[in-house]
Image (cartoon, rainbow, N blue to C red):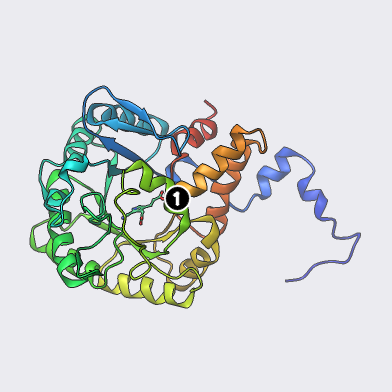
Amino acid sequence: MTIAPYPAARFRRARRSAAIRDLVRENSLSPADFIWPVFVRDGEGIEEPVPSMPGVMRRSVDRIADAAREAHSLGIPAICLFPYTDPSLKTENCAEAWNPDNLSNRATRAIKAAVPEIAVMTDVALDPYNINGHDGFVVDGEIVNDATVEALVKQALSQAEAGADIIGPSDMMDGRIGALRAALEGAGHSNVMLLSYAAKYASGFYGPFRDAVGASGALKGDKKSYQMDPANSDEALRLVERDLTEGADMVMVKPGLPYLDICRRVKDAFGAPTFAYQVSGEYAMIQAAAQNGWIDGEKVMLESLMAFKRAGCDGILTYFAPAAARILNGQ
Ligand code: PBG
């Protein structure tokens, strides 16, 4: 890198006008960068606010189809479903997770019928269906790995059957990517993609999400025996490499902003399609400060999303997707 001495080099020349700033900008943000996570509940005609996530709703299946139409018209390529499961359907064996008619699968079918062009992503993990709120089966106080993977396979196959385009295993069990890939291939779903939550940390930033899906009250203990230690970085690279070799098509880092260093390392090391999840707590912090008038919410939203692009991400899962898309589209 060669830099002329001042005054030959004046960096402010490149910042002088909007036209010049537009010209030299290194990264860009567009609605095509977003995956929009949405919460589904039962009933009809319902949009129920999630208190800890101002601006986010739990929607009934018919309203989810409307949301998908809106997303598509805004240029958002994908929507990601999270079910708010009725507590009476939560059990120890989590059978609702692979019920072909569960909320997530009904929503997938409704979206695919309404807007076949939009990509539907679904979540693979047992927590919405588990009486104790964990992502895996609990046996004698332990979250067991291999039996959970077998259940995740059944769950993923029911999602693929319902029409999911992208399956997102968020459970952090070992060996699940290989098992899921083999099962999908075996069942003729060879085009269904796996977006692995490869580097998912045991984070305090998931609090509002657990409220949104009704898992907060249920969760006994913490998820530290399967989600990553926030102190680790090399381990994230080993996990991403492992998942790519097992057949993940895309990988994710989660949470987002506090882990941008991981995003950059993952992108540089593997060059695979890399996503970050700007999680519920990150969203809630920005919304809360904006509602108090302490920050300019729109500015901070767009700045936070651009940060992911700068860190090397190809896309972002964000609850801001429709709001950001509207601004980016000049609407
Ligand atoms: C659970 C799951 C979580 C999120 C996505 N899938 C929470 C958790 O691991 O407890 C968090 C998303 C968010 O906070 O926005 N499988």
Residue 128: percent from left, percent from top: 25, 49
At horizontal 23% and vertical 72% (from top left) the residue drawn is 175
**Residue farthest along the right direction in this orientation:** 7
Residue 45: percent from left, percent from top: 26, 22
Is 47 drawn above or below residue 183 in the view shown? above
Give whichever of 66, 148 is nearer the camera. Answer: 148
User: In which image quadrant can residue 73 be found?
Assistant: top left
**Quick check: is the Cβ at mark 1 less than 8 Å away from ligand 1?**
yes
**Residue farthest along the top direction in this orientation:** 45
Q: Is residue 131 left or right of residue 18?
A: left
At horizontal 12% and vertical 48% (from top left) the residue drawn is 161
User: In which image quadrant can residue 102 be found?
Assistant: top left
Q: Which residue is mark 1?
A: 279
Residue 303: percent from left, percent from top: 60, 45
Residue 10: percent from left, percent from top: 85, 56
Amino acid identity at mark 1 = Val
Q: Give the crowd class for mark 1: few <14, some 14-19, many >=20 residues within 10 Å.
A: many
Quadrant the N terminus occupies: bottom right
Q: Is residue 321 left or right of residue 127?
A: right
Is 203 drawn above or below residue 178 in the view shown? above
Residue 116 in sight? yes
Is 312 drawn above or below residue 282 in the view shown? below
At horizontal 57% and vertical 48% (from top left) the residue drawn is 304
Total number of numbered labels?
1
Give whichever of 191, 242 is nearer the camera. Answer: 242
Circle 1: element type? loop
